[in-house]
Amino acid sequence: MTSTVAAIKEVIAKLRDTPQLATELSDTADLIDHLRLDSLEMLQFMLELEDRLVIRIDFDRLEFSYLHSIHTLADFLDSMPPRQASPGPL
């Protein structure tokens, strides 16, 4: 299992407040039809993934079909650029 797949599963488990989900979910689990993430949960999910993976998700390139498999979403996220460090306080 890739670290991105593991991160996705951990974020879902945290979002659903169900720790065992991280080990129970299949790599092919469908985020839309199986997990039924609503729009608010999806936004929280994506923001948490950006933080955890230290990436910047290009939402213009994110296709709905990527959400039908954890593995497919992981492949997409692995292609995202690293997030630039924000400047510190002056």
Image: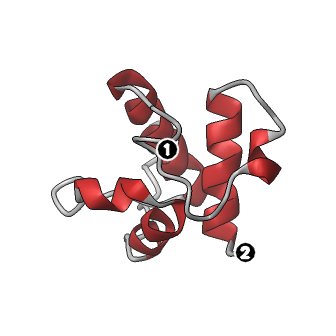
Residue 40 lies left or right of residue 45; in this view the side is left
Q: Quadrant of residue 79?
A: bottom left
Who is closer to the viewer here, 74 or 86? 74
Say which of 31 and 60 sits in front. 31
**Residue type at tag 2:** Met
Which residue is located at x 82 percent, y 35 percent?
19
Determine the residue positioned at 49% across, 38% down.
Answer: 45
For residue 75, say whether it is visible.
yes
- Which residue is tagged 1? 88
Q: Position of residue 8 (x, y in %)?
A: 60, 53
Which numbered disc covers residue 1? 2
Front residue (pair 46, 28):
28
Q: Nearer the viewer, mark 1 or mark 2?
A: 2
Image coordinates of residue 7 in percent, x first then y, are: 66, 56
Q: CA distance from mark 1 to mark 2?
A: 35 Å
Residue 54 on image: x %, y %: 53, 58
Q: Residues within 10 Å of mark 2 (few under 14, many from 20)?
A: few
Q: Quadrant of residue 14?
A: top right
User: Can residue 58 be seen in the rendering of this structure?
Assistant: no
- As drawn, the residue found furthest toward the left would be 60
Quadrant occupied by the N terminus: bottom right
